[in-house]
Image (spheres, rainbow, N blue to C red):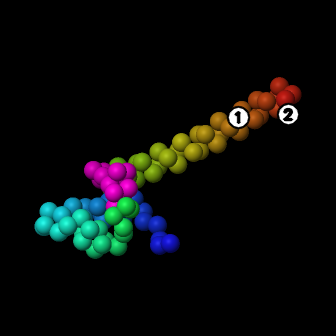
Amino acid sequence: MGKRSTPEEIIAKLQEVEVRLARGETTAQAVRSIGVTEQTYYRWRKEYGGLQVGQAKRMKENARLRRAISDLTLDNQILQEVIKGKF
């Protein structure tokens, strides 16, 4: 299993593939040049296609905030049940 790429790296690789495709390379050749499989390329394109680096950073921050809120909500619900006497 290879190393995981950051969203910024993924966006840069997708842009590189777009340039190579515009030059006339096939998808397989362009994807091979960035070191991933075609399946990974299409998955990345589906998730990050058309995004800029700043948008990817915001997406990552929003996901982190959603996790934090859900954790706090769960803690709050547990405390409310304890206060009511339910165990």
Q: Which mark is residue 20?
A: none
- Residue 81 horizontal/vertical position (percent): 79, 30
Query: According to the image, label 1 marks what residue?
Result: 76
Residue depicted at x 42% and y 63%: 6
**Which SS does the magenta portion mostly show?**
helix
Residue depicted at x 30% and y 65%: 13
- Residue 82 horizontal/vertical position (percent): 82, 32
Q: Is residue 20 left or right of residue 76?
A: left
Could you classify mark 1 by the number of other residues whose Cα lies within 10 Å: few (under 14), some (14-19), or many (20 or more)?
A: few
The kind of residue on which mark 2 rests is: Phe
Query: According to the image, label 2 marks what residue?
Result: 87
Q: Residue furthest left?
A: 23
Labels 1 and 2: the sequence-earlier one: 1
Residue depicted at x 53% and y 44%: 65
- Residue 59 horizontal/vertical position (percent): 42, 48
The kind of residue on which mark 1 rests is: Asn
Q: Which residues are magenta?
A: 41-52
Q: Is residue 62 left or right of residue 32?
A: right
Q: Residue furthest top?
A: 84
Residue depicted at x 38% and y 62%: 40
- Residue 55 horizontal/vertical position (percent): 35, 49
Q: Under tag 2, what secondary structure?
A: loop
Is residue 16 visible to the viewer in this orientation of the structure? no
Question: Residue 75 sits in which quadrant?
Answer: top right
67 magenta-colored: no
**Circles 1 and 2 in contact, beta carbons < 8 Å:** no
Cα–Cα span, label 1 and label 2: 14 Å
Could you classify mark 2 by the number of other residues whose Cα lies within 10 Å: few (under 14), some (14-19), or many (20 or more)?
A: few
Q: Under tag 1, what secondary structure?
A: helix
The one nearer the camera, 29 or 5, is 29
Q: Is residue 24 left or right of residue 1?
A: left
